[in-house]
Amino acid sequence: MIVLVPAYQPGAALPALVERLTRADVGSDVVVVDDGSGPAFAGVFDEAARRGATVITHPLNRGKGAALKTGIRDILARFPGHDVVTADADGQHIVHDIQRVADALASDVSHQPALVLGARAFRGTVPLRSRVGNTVARGLFRIAAGWNASDTQTGLRGIPAGMLPWLLDVPGERFEYETEMLLRLRSAGFEAREIAVDTIYLESNTSSHFRPIIDSVRVTAPLLAFAASSLLAFLVDTIALLVLTAMTGSLIGSIVGARLLSATVNFVVNRQFVFRRRGRQRMIAQGLGYVTLALLLLGSNVVWMTFLTDLGLPLLAAKVITETVLAVTSYQVQRRVIFAGGRTDPERQRRLAPSQERPRSTEVPGDRMNLTIPRRERTP
């Protein structure tokens, strides 16, 4: 078991955490990634190394997601086959909870790897920005992903070894990476489970580098992207419906014509920008799947629109109600079926996970930047 800690401009909590982890013998090693903290924080990382951590340094700040990927590459190179527990460097995660996540991960003997989430309860004295941020993210996540995670922003996660290569392909370089991980989890063939952990905020969480406005946009960007795409399709569909109805007087014919136009726009935008399935690979299969979904939604659209307008609702009101009902279903099918990314195949896992005989290197495999990796042994 390896403990991975991404860190940017940390305080004294980081070396203290490393010391407690090594004394408690949680995991076989502690890997700390200095995400471009700068010379002013070199002493903190030197102290963490003296207390038993392997420290990897980014010359420039690249974001939490990039730091996690760098740590994963190092672990795949030096500790192939080992599970990983990620923890934050700001003192929010105590050794007891890290150990509980590690134990839960080690006790999972199922054939379907599961991500273990250390979920905070958010009870008691919790900073307002943390409480509000998690509440908003949790609600949006449930709509987008189709399953409920009580703490979508937790950095305390237990990752089985078989999931590590896949995580290198998950998009995102900053805080949004952890949300993308959860959004893509089930479509990649993995599961998630939660264990309750303590909610700890030191000095009202002032050491956190999470920026409420900028990073909330980043975290919710995957969710907002689909909403924007759906809104665009809705606008195209609505305008086309009103125009065609005025021109032809046929409700059903206008619905069909408007839906064909909006569905084409939606497919292109979702494939290129929302789910990022660019290129020609699987394009035909995705197109056929989307057409099938569009036809099913079209049938539902006609039934609902006819029913609601027969009840006396105005055309526009009936349209809004119908699209709201069908939007969530459309998203779930697209994410889980049509644009789903397959689980990393065994051959690719063998390529990404070097053999144990591979010599240790001072450069993390697969990273485009040279990294300073002081190799220090643990002090007694």
Image (cartoon, helix red, strand yellow):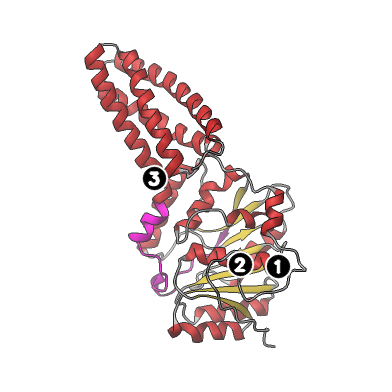
Q: Work out whether mark 2 precedes mark 1 in sequence or the reverse, and give the earlier one.
A: 1
Q: Quadrant of residue 322?
A: top left
Q: Position of residue 198 (x, y in %)?
A: 53, 65
Label 1 belongs to which residue?
79
In front of the other: label 3 or label 2?
3
In the picture shown, does residue 177 fall above or below 293? below
Cα–Cα gap, marks 3 and 1: 37 Å
Q: Work out whether mark 3 precedes mark 1 in sequence or the reverse, and give the earlier one.
A: 1
Q: Is residue 195 visible?
A: no
Q: Secondary structure at mark 3?
A: helix
The magenta stretch spans residue 265: no
Q: Residue at x 43, y 63 (%)?
A: 124
Q: Quadrant of the N terminus?
A: bottom right
Label 2 belongs to which residue?
98
Q: Residue furthest left?
A: 246
Q: Work out whether mark 3 precedes mark 2 in sequence or the reverse, and give the earlier one.
A: 2
In front of the other: label 2 or label 1?
1
Label 3 belongs to which residue?
225
Q: Residue at x 75, y 64 (%)?
A: 355
Q: Residue at x 52, y 27 (%)?
A: 288
Q: Give, as a three-letter code, the residue at label 2.
A: Ile
Q: Position of residue 3 (x, y in %)?
A: 62, 69
Towards the viewer: 293 or 322: 293
Q: Give, as a three-letter code, the residue at label 1.
A: Phe
From which residue to which does the magenta span run?
Answer: 194-220
